[in-house]
Amino acid sequence: MNNMLDYIEEYGDFSFKEKAFNEVDNLIFSQLAYTDFKDIADKQSVSLLKGAKLFFAMYTQEEIENLIAISVKSADLLKKCSKTKRFSNVIMCDYINNVNDDIDKQFSAIHFLLDDGSDVVAFRGTDVTVTGVKESAMLSYMFPVPAQIEALYYFQETSMLHSGDIILCGHSKGGNLAVFAAVNCSNSLKKRITAVYEDDAPGFPKYFFDRYDYCQIKDKIHLITPQTSIIGRMLYHDAAPLIVHSENAGLKQHQASSWQVEGDRFKTEEKYDRTSDFISDYINELIDYISDEELELFFDTLEY
């Protein structure tokens, strides 16, 4: 079965001018956002090719293999992309990685400037630090969470430095941050947004979708989830999901590397499976039933 690595192999010789950005490209950039580009793309703009060379010069293969699994996969993805015409000349800039344990905030994002003039803003999903996991849990009882506020500030400040159309994307919590930033940004930025991708991302409180600024952007939002999605069905979504076939089972379907690709599109399923329906219904009923204070106490207890 093919995945995004096979897509890179098949379409890597096409620039973004020759072949427009699509849903699989979105997943690739949302996964590249898990790479640590500190001292590479934070204080300077570099091509993806140069950024890859700097990254692999900074870390040994042993050090990379000792990273968390998703960062190991993103490093492999970076190497694969750097060898193609499509991705090697993409400009990376405005990287940030901000973790604050005092206020339970984990936030990271980066810009990718494409050769067709588009600006792809990718927000990193939850890492495996206690702060990152706890903040994802906070989405169920606090709104907005610190990372959402920083995502809006980051998007508003950095996007004004670039021109052209804007695409926002992110996997897991990163997709939630992409939607939050797009909905709450200035009208001048909203006009430049062509698409927002949330890849198996937790949703929002129901009242979020009644807001006028959400209605302004709703038709540009693309929700993509696997058929046994759990994370992507937490809380509420307004967009109809594109349900992707995954070669993994259960929660491991959250791993984007397991999502199957046919040509330049995802292999899709007609509906969620029974496991996804049962667990998501149970979790959301629990969130609705238990008070915010009880949910906070529950997740604080898990931390210890």
Image (spheres, helix red, strand yellow):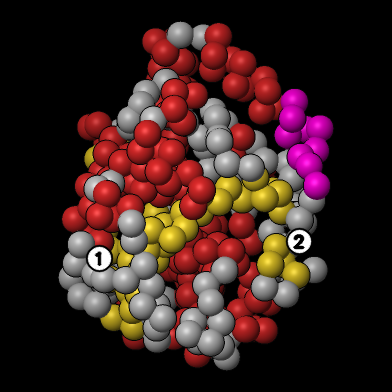
Left or right: residue 52 compared with residue 81: left
Q: Is residue 240 magenta?
A: no
Q: Residues within 10 Å of mark 2 (few under 14, many from 20)?
A: some
Q: Residue at x 35, y 26 (%)?
A: 143
Q: Residue at x 67, y 50 (%)?
A: 242
Question: Picture coordinates of residue 236 (x, y %)?
Answer: 55, 30
Q: Residue at x 34, y 46 (%)?
A: 181
> Any mark on residue 267, and which?
2
Figure quadrant of residue 33: bottom left
Left or right: residue 3 compared with residue 212: right
Q: Residues within 10 Å of mark 1 (few under 14, many from 20)?
A: many
> Any mark on residue 94, and which?
1
As displayed, is residue 84 above or below residue 3?
below
SS for dot 2: loop
Q: Is residue 227 visible?
A: yes
Figure quadrant of residue 193: bottom left
Q: Nearer the viewer, residue 98 or 274?
A: 274
> Any mark on residue 12, and which?
none
In magenta, the rendered stretch is 270-278
Quarter of the rendering occupied by the C terminus? top left
Quarter of the rendering occupied by the N terminus? bottom right
As displayed, is residue 8 above or below residue 182?
below
Q: Amino acid at mark 2?
A: Lys
Left or right: residue 33 compared with residue 14: left
The image shows a total of numbered marks equal to 2
Q: Amino acid at mark 1?
A: Asp
Q: Are marks 2 and 1 in contact (CB under 8 Å)?
A: no
Left or right: residue 175 compared with residue 263: left
SS for dot 1: strand
Question: Picture coordinates of residue 24 (x, y %)?
Answer: 60, 67
Q: Is residue 71 visible?
A: no
User: Distance of mark 2 from mark 1, alpha carbons?
Assistant: 33 Å
